Image: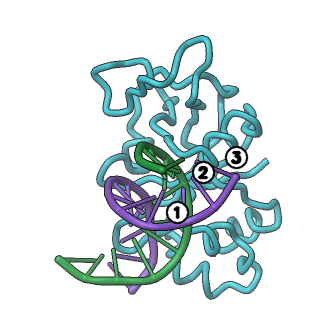
Chain colours: A cyan, B green, C purple
DNA sequence: GCCAACGTTGGC
DNA sequence: GCCAACGTTGGC
């Protein structure tokens, strides 16, 4: 399956993802129930992910990554030092989930939101309809259209 | 920095 | 279970 993950590059960018020494990165700190449900119930090892930079100029899809783990409880929810700590969660009944990803490809030319909006094939994208969702599904057709655009 | 959209919380 | 108040996201 295909997904889009949002990140604010000021906090964590695709450059950071590319620089990870471990080669895999835990996608943690997701604290939205709809996004959580996608992670916990749908994400699988081997899935492919579009990386989107939000709250920057210009906002854009900047590359792709691969999911390299199955979902597991996000450790930061149990860490009292973490800003992502959640006292309402427990190890027996964790609220929040993570996956590990690894960078696959940085686009030579990022695809700005305006370009996505101008592309007929992408008019149904969740990104264009539900702007605030930070983990969202992408159809194979959308994914392929984006890959084609990025290689032009 | 503004503000619209939308998610979450909590009182009732 | 409703809904008002509030907080956050994210494009512009």
Vertical order, A65 against A147 (above or below): above
Dot label at residue A132: 1
Q: Chain of mark 3?
A: A
Q: Number of numbered discs present?
A: 3
Judged from the image, the secondary structure of the residue bearing numbered disc 3 is strand
Dot label at residue A48: 3
- Which x, y percent locates residue A22? 45, 24
How far apart, in angstroms, are the residues tagged by discs 1 and 2?
A: 9 Å
Which residue occupies 58% across, 22% down? Answer: A94
Taking the image as shown, residue A9 lies to the left or right of residue A92, namely left
Which residue occupies 66% across, 38% down? Answer: A39
- Which is more N-terminal, label 1 or label 3? 3
Q: Chain of mark 1?
A: A
**Quadrant of the image containing the C terminus of chain A:** bottom right
Taking the image as shown, residue A2 lies to the left or right of residue A81, namely right
Q: Which residue is mark 2?
A: A135
- Which x, y percent locates residue A25? 49, 32
Judged from the image, the secondary structure of the residue bearing numbered disc 2 is strand
Q: Quadrant of residue A127?
A: bottom right
For marks 3 and 1, give the one nearer the viewer. 1
Question: Contact (CB < 8 A) between labels 3 and 2?
Answer: no
């Amino acid at each position: 399956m295909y997904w889009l993950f949002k990140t604010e590059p000021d906090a964590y960018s695709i450059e950071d993802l590319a620089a990870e020494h471990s080669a895999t990165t835990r996608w943690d700190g997701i604290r939205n129930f709809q996004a959580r449900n996608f992670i916990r119930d749908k994400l699988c090892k081997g899935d492919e992910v579009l990386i989107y930079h939000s709250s920057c100029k210009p906002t854009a899809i900047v590359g792709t990554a691969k999911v390299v783990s199955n979902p597991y409880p996000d450790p930061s929810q149990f860490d009292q030092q973490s800003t992502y700590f959640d006292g309402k969660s427990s190890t027996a009944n964790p609220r929040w989930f993570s996956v590990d990803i690894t960078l696959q490809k940085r686009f030579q030319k990022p695809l700005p939101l305006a370009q996505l909006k101008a592309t007929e094939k992408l008019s149904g994208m969740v990104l264009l309809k539900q702007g605030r969702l930070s983990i969202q599904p992408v159809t194979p057709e959308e994914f392929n259209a984006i890959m084609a655009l990025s290689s032009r």
